[in-house]
Amino acid sequence: MTDKLVRFFYKRLYWLVPLWYGLTQHLTSWRRWPPLDRYYTTREIVEALKWGAHWRPDPLKGNFDVLMCPGKFQSKINAGDTEFGDCDDHALYWCTALLQSGLASNAWLATVWYGRPGQKSTGHVVCVFAVEGLHFWCDYRDPTPSLGQWDWATDLADGRGKVAQAAGMTEVVLRRSGAPKFRIRTVKSHVF
């Protein structure tokens, strides 16, 4: 996507992201999946996810962005699969595991689009969460503190030698069943 299109999408159409992710997650939750493991530290989650070593792209060479339900993701961990899912699957698993285990008071599925001028830009999805008023972000490693609302996005882009162009966040809450749900009315986006 061009920089102008990305900015337009994040300013005007970002509300579509949780709708799409909610639909695709729902489609993968039709089967009865095992409950998520209970974790006592964030390090246990990182280790269960093998530090992201078993990442795999979405279907159609990553061009069909779908979100796997965390129960299905847990079944892949339990089975010892070597492919767990892409960044959005990891991020939603993080959000759900943190909330179910009581390791976070709030969690957000957060997307960022970043690049360098004159080069192709790309996106990434992470988990942003709050513990006792402090905020952190994580993808495949130990959580990193984040001071401001959008610092996680600039930190992530800076760490990859890129510049953050746009970011968005959707709060994740738990249903009575423990399954995650997106709070559409809490969607926030920011253009840098």
Image (cartoon, grey):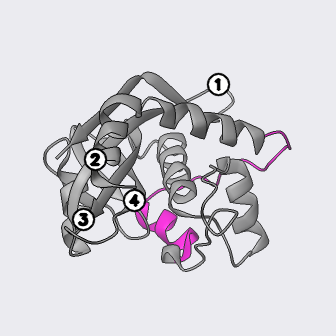
Tag 3, which secondary structure?
helix
Amino acid type, mark 1? Arg
Alpha carbon distance from label 2 to label 1: 41 Å
Q: How many labels does the image show?
A: 4
Alpha carbon distance from label 3 to label 1: 36 Å
**Quarter-wise, where is residue 83 in the image?**
bottom right
Q: How crowded is mark 3: few (under 14 residues within 10 Å), some or many (20 or more)?
A: many
> Is there CB contact under 8 Å for labels 2 and 1?
no
User: Which residue is at 74% across, 75% downward?
Assistant: 80
**Bounds of the magenta segment:** 29-50
Question: Mark 4 or mark 1: which comes first in sequence?
Answer: 4
Alpha carbon distance from label 4 to label 2: 15 Å
Is residue 75 shown above or below 92?
below
Q: In the image, residue 157 lies at what x, y percent?
A: 24, 65
Tag 2, which secondary structure?
helix
User: Which residue is at 40% across, 40% downward?
Assistant: 107
Alpha carbon distance from label 3 to label 2: 18 Å
The tag on residue 176 is 1
The residue wearing badge 4 is 123
The residue wearing badge 3 is 157
Task: Using the image as rendered, state which of residue 41 and residue 18 is in the foreground.
Answer: 18
Amino acid type, mark 3? Ala
